[in-house]
Amino acid sequence: MLENIGLSFQGIWNHKTRSLLTMLGIIIGIAAIITIVSTIKGTNDQIKQNLIGSGNNVVTVTIKSTNDSYVDLEYGPRPEGVGVVDDEVIEGLLEIENLDAASSYVSRSWANGVYYKNTAFEGGINGIDRNYFSVQGYRLNYGRMFVDDDFKQHKKVVIIDTKAMRSVFDGADPLGAIMEFMGEPFTVVGVVENTSKSNVVINSVNDYYTYTDSSGGTVFMPIDTWSVCYKYDEPRTVVVKASSTDEMTTVGDAAANYLTGAVITGSQYQYKADNLLEQASELQALSQSTSQQLIWIAGISLLVGGIGVMNIMLVSVSERTREIGLKKAIGAKKRRILGQFLTEAAVLTSLGGLLGVLSGIGLAKLLSNVIGTPAAISVPSCVIAVVFSMVIGIVFGLIPAVKAARLNPIEALRRD
Amino acid sequence: MSMILEMHDICKDYPMGKSVLHVLNNIDLSVEQGEYLAIMGPSGSGKTTLMNVIGCLDTPTSGSYLLDGVDVAGCSDNKLADIRNKKIGFVFQSFNLLPKMTALDNVALPLLYQGVKRKERRERAAEALEMVGLGDRMNFKQNQMSGGQCQRVAIARAMAINPGILLADEPTGALDSVSGAAVMDLFHQIHERGTTIIMITHDRSIAEHADRIVHIRDGILTGGEFDA
């Protein structure tokens, strides 16, 4: 066997040009498939990463109506039958398996009546509990985080994110500045930045709208202070952090069930977990379906390549009739001749597959540099591609190999 | 003396449309262990067919053929390949070396088919090449050697397996007279060491090197004249 493989390489080397031309179909087919697969995988990885955030594993649990109608969670009081998610409920959530942390908050995506000097702040405002920043993955850039007293004493303090800092303060030092919320003065005590969302990769305008909000940033105040400036005790949204990305769905559902049971009476509303994995797979399916058709087209190139291999192997068998005749005369059995030609075909196409994989990887990287489509090399698919090329060689080498094995040694030796 | 080859009533027919061509007719041939036999005949006499049958490349239509005590007549293709591999050393008119292999690899090829390990293969092939006087040409390829040298490589290939019979088909046919004489000398040495040689030729001067000459004409074997 090893002998055969060695001889096959020698044979390929002896006919360099012919071998390369024979392999070309396989090379092109495999390269195309690897390029497509790498691009699909790259896109999918990116979708997943953008939506889920790498390593953050946070699921948002919000109030939904049970009959799918829209529930306005902002600028209004809690709907009837919806209780408050207080610290006790949050404690209860922590009992759920694989749930690492939980936090609740109220929010307004457009904060009305917020000013710094004469500048109106055009962004969102969140009233948050103690755990919010750590669960959501915020990092303190300047100043301080909220402390217990801020909550207990309903202190009028706010923390702003870097985006809000840029949109409102425009380079001025925000720490200690007084902002006006519905006429109430609040002191800016800190600036935070969301570290988990900073690595969203934007490749297109669509991506931009999918992954970013274009507002002027967010400001945060202690949830206990919320009622000082906003009269409503709005329904709270809960974020829970799962121990791993794979656990996000189960943890989210368990948290939603728990919350529904704990704070909601009646059957009109329920807490529901945003299923980011589902969203991700929907987006992935969209990008995949088009690409999969391309794979079929590339498959045709492999078929053509296989037929090319068969053609050349048939020529090779005719050319080497005397060699086959001699080998049979001095004692080579059918099986050995068959093995020799099958090995040659398989080595030829495997080599083609290998070259195809390499050029496919190169092409995917090139495309990702030039057009910006993400590329991720999947090692299993590379291995499968090479193995598949080998199978092509064996399948299309079968007819020539059987022909060679069946040659009559007398006639084969007589041939010139 | 024991017989290495015993043929009785061997016939070989080829169908030619509706009629049948009788290429070999009731051949009786016995060859003793260690004998040097020449089979002579003009072209079309059936001598090549006879050689193919002797060399187990072809099976007779009828008759019995014992090679080294084994009945060859009814063997399968694979069994015949085995017998050729172990018992017959072929020498062809046109050498039939594999041009892309070195002399050593060519000689080692039948040993590969016997399943001999690589190291031993190379040793035995080298020994055979020494024997034919080409110890210094082991890594040469066909295009780097003269016709006479190529034929000696072919003889080394035949002898590497220690065959029961060295079967030569016009071994000097493609050689000049000097190289031809060298090949005949080599055959003598091989014969003296006890190997049975059967040589097929149409050339009387070559045939006369043998101990015994038989003639074949129109598929019928005649003679059995004993020479020197």
Image: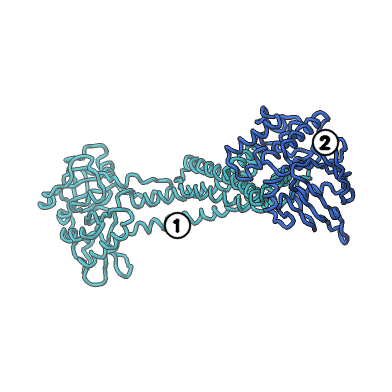
Chain colours: A cyan, B blue
Choose between B20 and A24: the one closer to the eye: B20
Image spot of residue A240 (x, y percent): 25, 56
Above or below A96: residue A379: above
**Disc 1: CA contacts within 10 A as few (<14), some (14-19) or many (>=20):** some
Residue displayed at 30% across by 53% down? A244
Above or below A132: residue A65: below
Select label 1 or label 2 by which is in front.
Answer: 2
Q: Are marks 1 and 2 on the same chain?
A: no
Choose between A387 and B25: the one closer to the eye: B25
The answer to whether B113 appears left or right of A278 in the picture is: right
- Chain at tag 2: B
* Residue type, mark 2 in image: His
Residue displayed at 74% across by 56% down? B73
Secondary structure under tag 1 reads helix
- Chain at tag 1: A
Locate the C terminus of chain B and report the quarter of the image it occupies: top right
Q: Which residue is mark 1?
A: A285
Specify whether residue B156 is in view.
yes
Image spot of residue B132 (x, y percent): 71, 32
- Res B33 quadrant in image: top right
Structural distance between the alpha carbons of marks 1 and 2: 84 Å
Secondary structure under tag 2 reads loop
Q: Which residue is mark 2?
A: B209
Image spot of residue B56 (x, y percent): 74, 50
The answer to whether B142 appears left or right of A374 in the picture is: right
* Residue type, mark 1 in image: Ala
Image spot of residue A66 (x, y percent): 30, 69
Above or below A313: residue A59: below
- Res B204 quadrant in image: top right
